[in-house]
Amino acid sequence: MIPVVALLALVALAAPVAWAQSADLGPAPRALAARAEAAPRVDGVLDDPAWASALVISGFMQHEPFEGRPASERTEVRILFDQDAIYVGAWLYDADPTGIVRGETRRDARIDDTDAFLIVLDTYHDRQNAFVFGTTPAGIEYDGQVVREGTGSGIQSLRQQGGATAGFNLNWDGSWEVATSADEQGWYAEFRIPFSTLRYGQGGEQTWGLNLARHIRRRNEQSFWSPVGRQFTLWRVSSAGTLDGIEAPVRRTVQITPYSLASTSKDYASVAPVPEECARLSCRFDMGSYAGDVALGGDAKLGLTPSLTLDLTYNTDFAQVEVD
Protein backbone atom coordinates (compact mmCIF):
# COMPACT_ATOMS: atom_id res chain seq x y z
CA MET A 1 0.00 0.00 0.00
CA ILE A 2 2.91 2.37 0.64
CA PRO A 3 3.90 2.68 -3.06
CA VAL A 4 0.27 3.40 -3.99
CA VAL A 5 -0.06 6.05 -1.28
CA ALA A 6 3.21 7.63 -2.36
CA LEU A 7 2.08 7.68 -6.00
CA LEU A 8 -1.22 9.33 -5.06
CA ALA A 9 0.64 11.92 -3.02
CA LEU A 10 2.90 12.75 -5.96
CA VAL A 11 -0.12 13.12 -8.27
CA ALA A 12 -1.83 15.40 -5.75
CA LEU A 13 1.28 17.57 -5.51
CA ALA A 14 1.83 17.68 -9.27
CA ALA A 15 -1.72 18.74 -10.12
CA PRO A 16 -1.50 22.22 -8.54
CA VAL A 17 1.92 22.73 -10.14
CA ALA A 18 0.56 21.85 -13.60
CA TRP A 19 -2.45 24.10 -13.08
CA ALA A 20 -0.20 26.95 -11.94
CA GLN A 21 1.96 26.58 -15.05
CA SER A 22 -1.15 26.69 -17.25
CA ALA A 23 -2.51 29.68 -15.36
CA ASP A 24 0.79 31.61 -15.47
CA LEU A 25 -0.12 33.59 -18.56
CA GLY A 26 1.68 36.81 -17.71
CA PRO A 27 0.15 40.30 -17.70
CA ALA A 28 -2.80 40.88 -20.00
CA PRO A 29 -1.90 42.91 -23.11
CA ARG A 30 -3.20 46.40 -23.87
CA ALA A 31 -4.28 47.92 -27.19
CA LEU A 32 -4.96 51.49 -28.26
CA ALA A 33 -7.61 52.58 -30.76
CA ALA A 34 -7.01 55.55 -33.07
CA ARG A 35 -9.50 58.14 -34.23
CA ALA A 36 -10.19 57.99 -37.97
CA GLU A 37 -10.21 61.34 -39.76
CA ALA A 38 -12.13 59.66 -42.58
CA ALA A 39 -14.06 56.43 -42.13
CA PRO A 40 -12.62 53.48 -44.07
CA ARG A 41 -14.75 51.86 -46.73
CA VAL A 42 -15.86 48.43 -45.50
CA ASP A 43 -14.87 46.28 -48.46
CA GLY A 44 -12.40 43.85 -46.92
CA VAL A 45 -9.44 45.24 -48.90
CA LEU A 46 -7.90 47.30 -46.05
CA ASP A 47 -6.19 49.81 -48.32
CA ASP A 48 -7.74 52.97 -46.85
CA PRO A 49 -5.18 55.53 -45.58
CA ALA A 50 -6.93 55.62 -42.19
CA TRP A 51 -5.54 52.19 -41.29
CA ALA A 52 -1.99 53.52 -41.38
CA SER A 53 -2.73 55.73 -38.35
CA ALA A 54 -3.68 52.80 -36.11
CA LEU A 55 -1.23 50.85 -33.96
CA VAL A 56 -0.65 47.20 -34.84
CA ILE A 57 -2.02 44.56 -32.46
CA SER A 58 -0.14 41.26 -32.78
CA GLY A 59 1.59 38.58 -30.71
CA PHE A 60 -1.12 35.89 -30.84
CA MET A 61 -0.41 32.76 -28.77
CA GLN A 62 -1.75 29.27 -29.30
CA HIS A 63 -4.57 27.99 -27.12
CA GLU A 64 -4.77 24.74 -29.08
CA PRO A 65 -3.02 22.47 -29.87
CA PHE A 66 0.21 23.74 -28.23
CA GLU A 67 -0.76 26.08 -25.43
CA GLY A 68 1.62 28.97 -24.91
CA ARG A 69 3.49 28.68 -28.20
CA PRO A 70 3.41 31.52 -30.75
CA ALA A 71 0.71 31.16 -33.39
CA SER A 72 1.87 29.34 -36.52
CA GLU A 73 0.76 32.20 -38.80
CA ARG A 74 1.12 35.96 -38.40
CA THR A 75 -1.98 37.96 -37.48
CA GLU A 76 -2.15 41.76 -37.29
CA VAL A 77 -5.14 43.79 -36.13
CA ARG A 78 -5.80 47.53 -36.09
CA ILE A 79 -8.70 49.38 -34.44
CA LEU A 80 -10.17 52.75 -35.44
CA PHE A 81 -13.21 54.74 -34.36
CA ASP A 82 -15.18 57.82 -35.32
CA GLN A 83 -18.30 59.47 -33.91
CA ASP A 84 -20.55 56.68 -35.18
CA ALA A 85 -18.71 53.37 -35.01
CA ILE A 86 -15.57 51.39 -34.31
CA TYR A 87 -13.66 49.72 -37.12
CA VAL A 88 -11.54 46.59 -36.85
CA GLY A 89 -9.17 45.48 -39.58
CA ALA A 90 -7.55 42.04 -39.48
CA TRP A 91 -4.62 40.93 -41.63
CA LEU A 92 -4.66 37.12 -41.41
CA TYR A 93 -1.48 36.07 -43.18
CA ASP A 94 -1.08 32.48 -44.35
CA ALA A 95 1.95 30.79 -45.90
CA ASP A 96 -0.37 28.38 -47.73
CA PRO A 97 -3.51 30.29 -48.71
CA THR A 98 -4.73 27.30 -50.73
CA GLY A 99 -5.35 25.58 -47.40
CA ILE A 100 -7.71 28.28 -46.09
CA VAL A 101 -11.18 26.82 -45.40
CA ARG A 102 -13.97 29.25 -46.34
CA GLY A 103 -17.00 27.43 -44.93
CA GLU A 104 -20.68 28.29 -45.26
CA THR A 105 -22.15 31.68 -46.12
CA ARG A 106 -25.08 31.52 -43.67
CA ARG A 107 -25.14 33.97 -40.75
CA ASP A 108 -24.04 32.43 -37.44
CA ALA A 109 -22.96 29.23 -39.21
CA ARG A 110 -20.65 26.84 -37.37
CA ILE A 111 -17.12 28.19 -37.24
CA ASP A 112 -15.29 25.15 -35.87
CA ASP A 113 -15.09 23.67 -39.38
CA THR A 114 -13.61 26.78 -41.04
CA ASP A 115 -10.90 29.36 -40.68
CA ALA A 116 -12.29 32.23 -38.59
CA PHE A 117 -11.53 35.48 -36.78
CA LEU A 118 -13.37 36.63 -33.64
CA ILE A 119 -13.57 39.84 -31.58
CA VAL A 120 -14.67 39.90 -27.92
CA LEU A 121 -15.67 43.34 -26.55
CA ASP A 122 -16.30 43.73 -22.82
CA THR A 123 -17.83 47.19 -23.16
CA TYR A 124 -18.69 47.62 -19.47
CA HIS A 125 -15.29 46.20 -18.45
CA ASP A 126 -17.06 44.09 -15.84
CA ARG A 127 -14.93 41.04 -16.76
CA GLN A 128 -18.07 38.92 -16.97
CA ASN A 129 -20.10 39.85 -20.06
CA ALA A 130 -19.18 40.76 -23.62
CA PHE A 131 -20.27 41.15 -27.22
CA VAL A 132 -18.80 38.82 -29.85
CA PHE A 133 -18.32 39.64 -33.53
CA GLY A 134 -16.68 37.31 -35.99
CA THR A 135 -16.35 36.20 -39.57
CA THR A 136 -14.82 33.58 -41.84
CA PRO A 137 -13.11 33.87 -45.24
CA ALA A 138 -16.62 33.57 -46.72
CA GLY A 139 -17.53 36.89 -45.08
CA ILE A 140 -20.34 35.67 -42.82
CA GLU A 141 -21.68 37.64 -39.87
CA TYR A 142 -21.17 35.73 -36.63
CA ASP A 143 -22.27 37.49 -33.45
CA GLY A 144 -23.56 36.82 -29.97
CA GLN A 145 -23.36 37.80 -26.31
CA VAL A 146 -21.23 36.24 -23.59
CA VAL A 147 -22.97 36.04 -20.22
CA ARG A 148 -21.18 35.16 -16.97
CA GLU A 149 -17.96 34.33 -18.83
CA GLY A 150 -19.74 31.84 -21.05
CA THR A 151 -20.47 29.36 -18.28
CA GLY A 152 -21.67 26.16 -19.90
CA SER A 153 -20.59 26.86 -23.49
CA GLY A 154 -17.53 26.56 -25.71
CA ILE A 155 -15.99 28.70 -28.41
CA GLN A 156 -18.20 27.06 -31.03
CA SER A 157 -21.90 27.05 -30.14
CA LEU A 158 -24.70 26.06 -32.44
CA ARG A 159 -27.64 28.46 -32.63
CA GLN A 160 -29.92 25.99 -30.88
CA GLN A 161 -27.37 25.60 -28.09
CA GLY A 162 -26.63 29.28 -27.68
CA GLY A 163 -29.32 30.50 -25.32
CA ALA A 164 -28.37 32.97 -22.60
CA THR A 165 -28.72 30.24 -19.96
CA ALA A 166 -25.84 28.39 -21.65
CA GLY A 167 -23.53 31.37 -21.17
CA PHE A 168 -23.38 32.34 -24.83
CA ASN A 169 -26.39 33.80 -26.63
CA LEU A 170 -25.95 33.18 -30.35
CA ASN A 171 -29.54 34.23 -30.99
CA TRP A 172 -28.55 37.89 -30.54
CA ASP A 173 -28.12 39.51 -33.95
CA GLY A 174 -26.71 43.02 -33.93
CA SER A 175 -26.64 45.58 -36.74
CA TRP A 176 -23.07 45.78 -38.09
CA GLU A 177 -21.02 45.17 -41.24
CA VAL A 178 -18.15 42.95 -42.27
CA ALA A 179 -16.37 42.25 -45.53
CA THR A 180 -13.49 39.93 -46.41
CA SER A 181 -10.98 39.43 -49.20
CA ALA A 182 -8.08 37.10 -49.96
CA ASP A 183 -4.88 37.03 -51.98
CA GLU A 184 -1.63 35.06 -52.20
CA GLN A 185 -0.58 36.26 -48.72
CA GLY A 186 -3.69 35.22 -46.77
CA TRP A 187 -7.12 36.65 -46.07
CA TYR A 188 -8.41 39.89 -44.60
CA ALA A 189 -11.46 41.03 -42.63
CA GLU A 190 -12.87 44.53 -42.12
CA PHE A 191 -15.56 45.31 -39.53
CA ARG A 192 -17.77 48.30 -38.84
CA ILE A 193 -19.59 48.08 -35.48
CA PRO A 194 -21.87 51.06 -34.75
CA PHE A 195 -21.90 52.39 -31.20
CA SER A 196 -25.70 52.13 -31.36
CA THR A 197 -25.34 48.34 -31.55
CA LEU A 198 -23.37 48.19 -28.30
CA ARG A 199 -24.21 48.77 -24.65
CA TYR A 200 -21.65 50.65 -22.56
CA GLY A 201 -21.44 53.10 -19.68
CA GLN A 202 -21.23 56.86 -19.94
CA GLY A 203 -20.05 58.48 -23.14
CA GLY A 204 -16.52 59.79 -23.50
CA GLU A 205 -13.19 57.98 -23.26
CA GLN A 206 -13.64 54.27 -22.73
CA THR A 207 -11.69 51.39 -21.23
CA TRP A 208 -13.03 48.10 -22.54
CA GLY A 209 -12.00 44.50 -22.24
CA LEU A 210 -10.76 43.04 -25.53
CA ASN A 211 -9.74 39.67 -26.85
CA LEU A 212 -9.13 38.48 -30.38
CA ALA A 213 -8.99 34.96 -31.73
CA ARG A 214 -8.00 33.21 -34.93
CA HIS A 215 -8.90 29.69 -35.99
CA ILE A 216 -6.81 27.85 -38.61
CA ARG A 217 -8.89 24.83 -39.50
CA ARG A 218 -6.34 22.65 -41.31
CA ARG A 219 -4.13 22.69 -38.21
CA ASN A 220 -6.96 22.62 -35.65
CA GLU A 221 -5.27 25.68 -34.22
CA GLN A 222 -6.85 28.36 -32.05
CA SER A 223 -4.74 31.35 -31.09
CA PHE A 224 -5.70 34.26 -28.83
CA TRP A 225 -4.31 37.77 -28.49
CA SER A 226 -4.74 37.68 -24.71
CA PRO A 227 -3.90 34.13 -23.57
CA VAL A 228 -6.57 32.13 -21.76
CA GLY A 229 -5.89 29.03 -19.67
CA ARG A 230 -6.45 25.82 -21.59
CA GLN A 231 -9.17 24.75 -19.19
CA PHE A 232 -11.20 27.80 -20.31
CA THR A 233 -12.51 29.15 -23.61
CA LEU A 234 -12.39 32.47 -25.42
CA TRP A 235 -15.46 33.49 -23.40
CA ARG A 236 -13.23 33.76 -20.30
CA VAL A 237 -13.73 37.53 -20.26
CA SER A 238 -11.68 38.01 -17.08
CA SER A 239 -8.60 36.90 -19.04
CA ALA A 240 -9.14 39.46 -21.79
CA GLY A 241 -6.74 42.28 -22.50
CA THR A 242 -7.62 45.98 -22.43
CA LEU A 243 -8.65 48.39 -25.17
CA ASP A 244 -8.05 52.10 -24.51
CA GLY A 245 -8.51 55.26 -26.53
CA ILE A 246 -12.06 54.93 -27.83
CA GLU A 247 -14.19 58.02 -27.32
CA ALA A 248 -17.81 56.90 -27.46
CA PRO A 249 -20.84 59.17 -27.90
CA VAL A 250 -23.36 59.56 -25.11
CA ARG A 251 -25.51 56.48 -25.42
CA ARG A 252 -29.22 56.82 -25.94
CA THR A 253 -30.73 54.51 -23.36
CA VAL A 254 -34.18 54.97 -24.88
CA GLN A 255 -34.96 54.65 -28.57
CA ILE A 256 -38.49 55.61 -29.65
CA THR A 257 -39.95 54.87 -33.08
CA PRO A 258 -43.38 56.45 -33.66
CA TYR A 259 -45.61 55.44 -36.55
CA SER A 260 -49.14 55.90 -37.85
CA LEU A 261 -51.60 53.29 -39.06
CA ALA A 262 -54.03 54.28 -41.81
CA SER A 263 -57.00 52.21 -42.96
CA THR A 264 -59.97 52.55 -45.28
CA SER A 265 -63.28 50.71 -45.43
CA LYS A 266 -66.11 50.53 -47.93
CA ASP A 267 -69.83 50.27 -47.25
CA TYR A 268 -70.97 47.79 -49.85
CA ALA A 269 -74.51 47.89 -48.49
CA SER A 270 -74.94 51.34 -50.00
CA VAL A 271 -73.99 50.22 -53.49
CA ALA A 272 -76.92 50.58 -55.89
CA PRO A 273 -77.88 47.51 -57.95
CA VAL A 274 -76.20 47.38 -61.35
CA PRO A 275 -78.77 48.12 -64.07
CA GLU A 276 -79.34 45.29 -66.49
CA GLU A 277 -78.31 47.38 -69.48
CA CYS A 278 -74.88 47.92 -67.88
CA ALA A 279 -74.10 44.30 -68.53
CA ARG A 280 -73.96 45.28 -72.24
CA LEU A 281 -72.97 48.96 -72.07
CA SER A 282 -70.33 51.05 -70.34
CA CYS A 283 -72.12 52.74 -67.46
CA ARG A 284 -71.30 54.88 -64.44
CA PHE A 285 -73.01 53.99 -61.21
CA ASP A 286 -72.67 54.40 -57.42
CA MET A 287 -69.68 52.44 -56.03
CA GLY A 288 -70.74 52.97 -52.43
CA SER A 289 -69.18 55.06 -49.68
CA TYR A 290 -65.66 54.94 -48.25
CA ALA A 291 -64.48 55.68 -44.68
CA GLY A 292 -60.95 56.32 -43.48
CA ASP A 293 -59.23 56.02 -40.11
CA VAL A 294 -55.79 56.93 -38.77
CA ALA A 295 -54.35 55.51 -35.53
CA LEU A 296 -51.05 56.40 -33.86
CA GLY A 297 -48.63 53.92 -32.31
CA GLY A 298 -44.98 53.40 -31.55
CA ASP A 299 -42.17 51.18 -30.31
CA ALA A 300 -39.63 51.93 -27.60
CA LYS A 301 -36.37 50.16 -26.68
CA LEU A 302 -34.81 50.65 -23.25
CA GLY A 303 -31.31 49.29 -22.61
CA LEU A 304 -31.27 47.88 -19.09
CA THR A 305 -28.07 45.81 -18.98
CA PRO A 306 -25.41 44.69 -21.49
CA SER A 307 -27.57 41.68 -22.39
CA LEU A 308 -31.10 42.90 -21.61
CA THR A 309 -33.23 45.32 -23.62
CA LEU A 310 -36.81 46.15 -22.69
CA ASP A 311 -39.06 46.40 -25.76
CA LEU A 312 -42.31 48.34 -25.43
CA THR A 313 -45.01 48.78 -28.04
CA TYR A 314 -48.32 50.61 -28.33
CA ASN A 315 -50.91 49.95 -31.01
CA THR A 316 -48.61 47.44 -32.70
CA ASP A 317 -48.41 47.33 -36.48
CA PHE A 318 -48.40 43.54 -36.83
CA ALA A 319 -47.62 43.82 -40.54
CA GLN A 320 -44.10 44.93 -39.53
CA VAL A 321 -43.52 42.26 -36.87
CA GLU A 322 -40.82 39.77 -37.83
CA VAL A 323 -41.52 36.09 -37.39
CA ASP A 324 -38.70 34.22 -35.64
Image (cartoon, grey):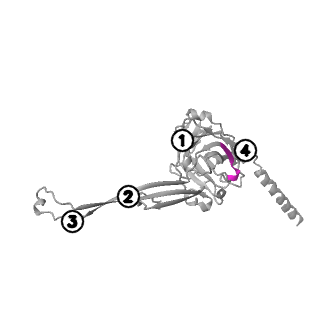
The one of 11 and 61 positioned closer to us in this rendering: 61
- Residue hosting label 3: 270
Tag 3 and tag 2, C-beta contact below 8 Å: no
Residues under labels 2 and 1: Cα distance?
41 Å
Q: Mark 2 vs mark 1: which is more N-terminal?
A: 1
- Residue hosting label 1: 180
Give the amino acid type for the residue marked by disc 3 in the picture. Answer: Ser
Q: Mark 1 vs mark 3: which is more N-terminal?
A: 1
Viewed as shown, does residue 220 lie left or right of 84?
right
Give the amino acid type for the residue marked by disc 4 in the picture. Answer: Arg
Pair 1/3: label in front: 3
Span colored in magenta: 237-244
Give the amino acid type for the residue marked by disc 2 in the picture. Answer: Leu
- Residue hosting label 4: 69
Residues under labels 3 and 2: Cα distance?
26 Å
- Residue hosting label 2: 261
**Snapshot quadrant of residue 292:** bottom left
Quadrant the N terminus occupies: bottom right
Tag 3 and tag 4, C-beta contact below 8 Å: no
Residues under labels 4 and 1: Cα distance?
27 Å
Q: Mark 3 vs mark 4: which is more N-terminal?
A: 4
